[in-house]
Amino acid sequence: MNNYFRRAEEIKCALLKEGKRQSMLLHSCCGPCSTACIDYLKEVFDVTVLFYNPNIAPEEEYELRAAEQKRYIDDFTSGVKYIICDYNPKVFYDAVKGLENCEEGGKRCEKCFELRLDYCARLAKEKGFDTFCTTLTVSPHKNAEIVNGIGEIIAKRYDIPFFPSDFKKKDGYLKSIRLSENAGLYRQNYCGCAFSVRKDV
């Protein structure tokens, strides 16, 4: 099994040693998850957060999470930019068609990861970012091996480096909880899609 946290540390150390900063488009699933990730990355990356989550339902939930993402960046970070995408759930339902009854964490979730990471990579390439990444691995409910594997495949598709991560390691998840509480962020009790409401994740 790959040690994605170690790989991330090696890349960070190399950039620090070279005195280089890179631009990163960071896909974020929500404000709370982005907190510890931004904190970890900002030392060597100029981070732009991408809030692209067509899986979230209903629309009111999407708007709330998007607003909290924006508020966190505006009020609690410095130098971090963001892109908030319009709500478009159709692309999610099209992507997971036929997988509606899959168990949580299964093939439907993998399709959802691919959908969001594909959009992030494509946009990062179009806008000239050096690399792209996702906050998904900060969650203890997300398999870092699967998320990173998808990211690496998509990186080849668009010829742009994917930054590997396992943000939950070294108390990263606990740090995200603490930072979220300090910022008074709304913390949802389900992953995002209508199917995940059937099971608390």
Image (cartoon, rainbow, N blue to C red):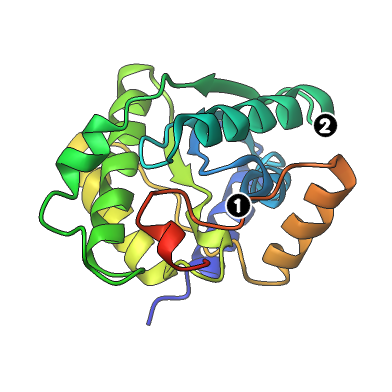
Give residue 53's quadrant in the image.
Answer: top left
For the point 28% across and 29% down, the residue is 122
Asked which secondary structure carries label 2, the reply is: helix
Image quarter of the N terminus: bottom left
For the point 52% across and 40% down, the residue is 28
* Residue 47 seen from this side: no
> 129 or 64, which lies in front?
64
Up/down of 62 relative to 85, above or below: below
Q: Residue furthest left?
A: 98
Up/down of 25 relative to 112, above or below: above
Up/down of 198 relative to 93, above or below: below
Which amino acid, by three-letter code, is at mark 2? Phe
For the point 42% across and 19% down, the residue is 86
- Dot 1 surroundings within 10 Å: few (below 14), some, or many (20 or more)? many
Q: Residue furthest right?
A: 182
* Residue 170 seen from this side: yes
The circle drawn on residue 106 is none
Specify whether 200 is left or right of 195.
Answer: right
Q: Earlier in the sequence, mark 2 or mark 1?
A: 1
Q: Residue 6: image x %, image y %?
A: 55, 70
Q: Residue 9: image x %, image y %?
A: 60, 61
- Dot 2 surroundings within 10 Å: few (below 14), some, or many (20 or more)? few
Asked which secondary structure carries label 1, the reply is: helix
Q: Which residue is mark 2?
A: 76
Q: Label 1 near label 2: C-beta < 8 Å?
A: no
Q: Nearer the viewer, mark 2 or mark 1?
A: 2
Q: Residue 197: image x %, image y %?
A: 45, 58
For the point 35% across and 57% down, the residue is 195
Q: Residue 59: image x %, image y %?
A: 46, 30
Which amino acid, by three-letter code, is at mark 1? Lys
Q: Which residue is mark 1?
A: 12
